[in-house]
């Protein structure tokens, strides 16, 4: 290869690196101090016009504000408690930096460190409270269709909206499967979860326009979304462990069983977020190849990946893998930089993992 060709390739790589990693600092009139454009994310995730991150513990507002991520999922509180909740000023700082802060909330399990928890429930549980999750101690199944639980969640939403979050990330929507395994008809449990998600969306959007709704896992709910109300309501969908179960590959059959639902979301013009816990924390060839494989599979499907540590703690903003993402784009000759599109109101119109302890 001629020296001139090598020089050109090096220049392209260097420029591309700084464009991606300094993009959060390249402010324009459309995305700085303009809360109307905080949902400027792509209609088409195939072009990867935004990056997302998922951190539920030790989230540092300054670190996130200076990162290359656009959509960031964090807890409403630094430590999960009411005393530790982020101030409106802190959330506003993220928005002024061009970020889209999304609050994590579990709607299918009650967590014993939250503001609503009553220790008396351990002795005299309310009728809607179920058994403790043996894999995540302190988390209890709930009959999410019960009015009292819904009132708790609506109160929770009020706090999140008052803080200034742009939307919510709904965990444990797959709890409909738990209750199916415990004596309830799945047609009932699935439809009640769909109803609850729609109610959450309507409640929130009546208080603040263009509120983003992202369910996590439970994509099989779309089987029961026969009139399209759920798909019409959500802004996108997120899943864990799609291609890998931590560091172990999933079978093609397992993957296809889930992507057939996720593709419905994508083909409806909405984004699909994927977090796999594939990073074992080392820089070995094995780990790098596994992460690259996860990135490639996600992008090939038109989904947006986030690489998380295999300990599943979600206690740091994992960024080093973004270098591998750059390599993917240059090697495939498909990397390009373009202005993000404003999220269509089509996503947001009124239709009307297990949880990670902190």
Image (cartoon, grey):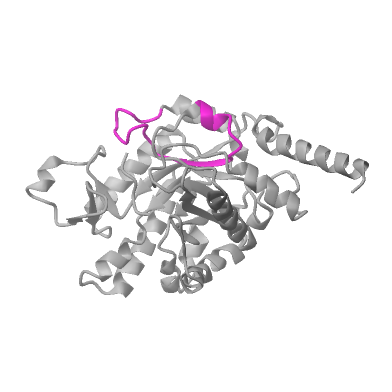
Q: Nearer the viewer, residue 200 or 223?
A: 223
Q: Residue drawn at (12%, 47%), measured in percent from left and top?
A: 121
Q: Nearer the viewer, residue 119 or 280?
A: 280
Q: Give the residue drawn at x 41%, y 58%.
A: 198
Q: Is residue 40 visible?
A: no
Residue 59, can we see it? yes
Asked if residue 220 lies left or right of residue 119, the reply is right
Q: Is residue 181 left or right of residue 3?
A: left
> Could you tell me which quadrant the C terminus lies in?
top left
**Left or right side of 163 for 186:** left
Q: Which residues are magenta?
A: 62-86
Q: Quadrant of residue 27?
A: top right
From the viewer's perspective, is residue 265 above or below residue 147?
below
From the image, give the main secondary structure of the stretch colored magenta.
Answer: loop
Residue at 39% x, 63% y is 194
Residue 291 location (% of width, % of height): 55, 52
Q: Position of residue 15 (x, y in %)?
A: 78, 36
Q: Where is residue 117 drawn, in percent x and y?
A: 20, 41
Answer above or below: position of 88 versus 126.
above
Q: Which residue occupies 37% across, 46% down?
A: 105
């Amino acid at each position: 290869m001629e020296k001139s060709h090598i020089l050109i390739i090096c220049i392209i790589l260097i420029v591309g690196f700084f464009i991606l990693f300094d993009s959060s600092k390249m402010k324009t009139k459309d995305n700085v101090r303009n809360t109307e454009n905080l949902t400027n994310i792509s209609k088409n995730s195939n072009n990867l016009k935004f990056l997302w991150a998922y951190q539920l513990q030790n989230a540092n507002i300054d670190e996130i504000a200076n990162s290359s991520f656009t959509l960031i999922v964090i807890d409403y509180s630094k430590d999960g408690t009411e005393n530790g909740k982020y101030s409106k000023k802190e959330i506003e700082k993220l928005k002024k930096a061009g970020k889209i802060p999304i609050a994590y909330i579990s709607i299918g399990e009650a967590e014993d460190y939250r503001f609503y928890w009553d220790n008396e429930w351990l002795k005299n549980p309310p009728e809607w409270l179920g058994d403790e999750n043996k894999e995540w101690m302190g988390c209890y199944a709930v009959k999410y269709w019960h009015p009292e639980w819904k009132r708790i969640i609506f109160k929770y939403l009020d706090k999140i909206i008052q803080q200034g979050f742009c939307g919510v990330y709904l965990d444990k929507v797959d709890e409909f499967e738990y209750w199916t395994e415990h004596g309830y008809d799945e047609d009932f449990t699935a439809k009640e979860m769909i109803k609850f998600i729609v109610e959450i969306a309507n409640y929130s959007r009546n208080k603040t326009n263009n509120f983003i709704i992202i369910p996590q896992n439970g994509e099989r709910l779309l089987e029961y979304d026969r009139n399209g109300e759920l798909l019409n309501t959500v802004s996108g969908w997120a899943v864990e462990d799609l291609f890998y179960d931590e560091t172990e590959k999933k079978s093609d059959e397992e993957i296809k069983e889930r992507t057939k639902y996720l593709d419905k979301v994508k083909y409806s013009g909405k984004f699909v977020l994927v977090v796999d816990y594939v990073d074992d924390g080392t820089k070995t060839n094995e780990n790098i190849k596994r992460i690259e494989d996860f990135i490639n599979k996600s992008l090939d499907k038109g989904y947006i990946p986030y690489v998380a540590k295999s300990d599943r703690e979600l206690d740091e903003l994992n960024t080093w893998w973004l270098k591998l993402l750059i390599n993917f784009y240059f090697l495939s000759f498909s990397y390009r930089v373009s202005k993000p599109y404003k999220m269509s109101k089509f996503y947001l119109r009124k239709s009307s993992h297990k949880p990670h302890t902190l």
